[in-house]
Image (cartoon, rainbow, N blue to C red):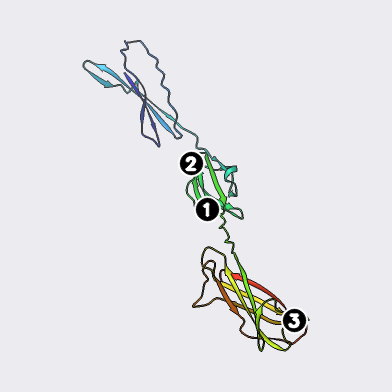
């Protein structure tokens, strides 16, 4: 009888065929044994035993040892793909043939507005770089996505009231007519919060005289103890100084309500 073993250099040995049959003196038997060749040098043993009276005896003259050498590849091919559904960048280096058993450092490069999400195929993880060991042909995919855009909060509010305070004659809701020439004036402006949450309000205005010259410019923000305004409520801003109404004609105010964070 005979047993055929394959002993690859890099893998455990295994049986690839056997013969257990009585063969009379002078006769011969042919048997075929096939197996998948590993990717390394392999030794094939044909172990033959003959029956001697009451037991099997190893027959070295009939046993054979065959060594099969596999040429060592000089390169392996690397295929790098960015799927269309995950486009948004590229990988360096790209597809090509690389020295066998070398390490290739892959780097993902997201385009502007995109971010890298991870590797696929023969690479894994989410780091921008990956060291790929080229011990066979490799296939690698890289995935990108658009950087999420945080929604911008839209502020809602309005200037609900404007009053002009002037010395000697009282005050009135802007626009005010028939104000005596030469008096000093002060603006009062109310800003309203139309948001669903408390908001910090600010104000900016300037007053131009009939000749277009700036009579007053003013900016202010809410401060403690009224640092924010509740929804639907108003906050009054009062100019820190006064300006003189010493010219005949129309004084124009330009007012802007500010919301959110100061600056």
Q: Please tell me the numbered disc located at residue 209.
A: 3
Which mark is in front, 2 or 1?
1
Residue placed most toward the observer, 205 or 135: 205
Query: Mark 2 highlights which residue?
Result: 135
Residue at 32% over, 14% down: 21
- State how far apart marks 2 and 3 are (Cα): 83 Å
- Answer few, some or many: residues within 10 Å of disc 1's Cα (few below 14, many 20 plus, some between 14 and 19): some
Q: Quadrant of the N terminus?
A: top left
Residue placed most toward the observer, 213 or 57: 213
Secondary structure under the numbered disc 1 in the rendered image: loop
- Choose top left, top right, bottom left or bottom right for residue 149: bottom right
Residue at 40% over, 30% down: 43
Regarding residue 262, the answer to whether it shows in the image is: no
Secondary structure under the numbered disc 3 in the rendered image: loop
**Is 33 left or right of 159, judged from the image as shown?**
left
Point out the tag, 2 or 1, that comes first from the N-terminus. Answer: 1
Q: Quadrant of the C terminus?
A: bottom right
Which mark is in front, 2 or 3?
3
Point out the tag, 3 or 1, that comes first from the N-terminus. Answer: 1
Query: Mark 1 highlights which residue?
Result: 128
């Amino acid at each position: 009888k005979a047993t055929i073993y394959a002993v690859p250099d890099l893998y455990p040995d295994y049986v690839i065929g056997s013969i257990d049959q009585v063969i009379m003196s002078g006769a011969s038997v042919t048997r075929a044994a096939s197996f998948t060749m590993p990717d390394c040098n392999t030794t094939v043993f044909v172990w033959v035993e003959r029956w001697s009276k009451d037991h099997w005896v190893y027959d070295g003259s009939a046993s054979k040892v065959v060594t099969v050498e596999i040429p060592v590849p000089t390169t392996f091919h690397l295929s790098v793909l960015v799927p269309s559904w995950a486009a948004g960048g590229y990988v360096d280096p790209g597809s090509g043939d690389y020295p066998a058993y070398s390490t290739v450092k892959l780097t993902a490069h997201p385009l502007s507005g995109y971010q890298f999400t991870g590797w696929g195929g023969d690479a894994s993880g989410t780091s921008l770089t990956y060291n790929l060991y080229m011990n066979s042909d490799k296939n690698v995919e890289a995935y990108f996505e658009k950087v999420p855009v945080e929604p911008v909060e839209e502020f809602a509010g309005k200037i609900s009231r404007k009053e002009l305070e002037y010395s000697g004659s009282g005050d009135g809701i802007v626009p005010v007519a028939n104000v005596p020439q030469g008096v000093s004036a002060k603006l009062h402006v109310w800003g309203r919060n139309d948001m669903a949450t408390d908001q910090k309000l600010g104000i900016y205005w300037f007053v131009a005289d009939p000749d277009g010259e700036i009579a007053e410019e003013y900016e202010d923000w809410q401060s403690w103890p009224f640092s924010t305004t509740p929804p639907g409520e108003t906050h009054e801003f009062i100019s820190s100084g006064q300006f003189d109404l010493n010219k005949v004609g129309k004084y124009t105010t330009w007012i802007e309500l500010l919301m959110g964070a100061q600056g």
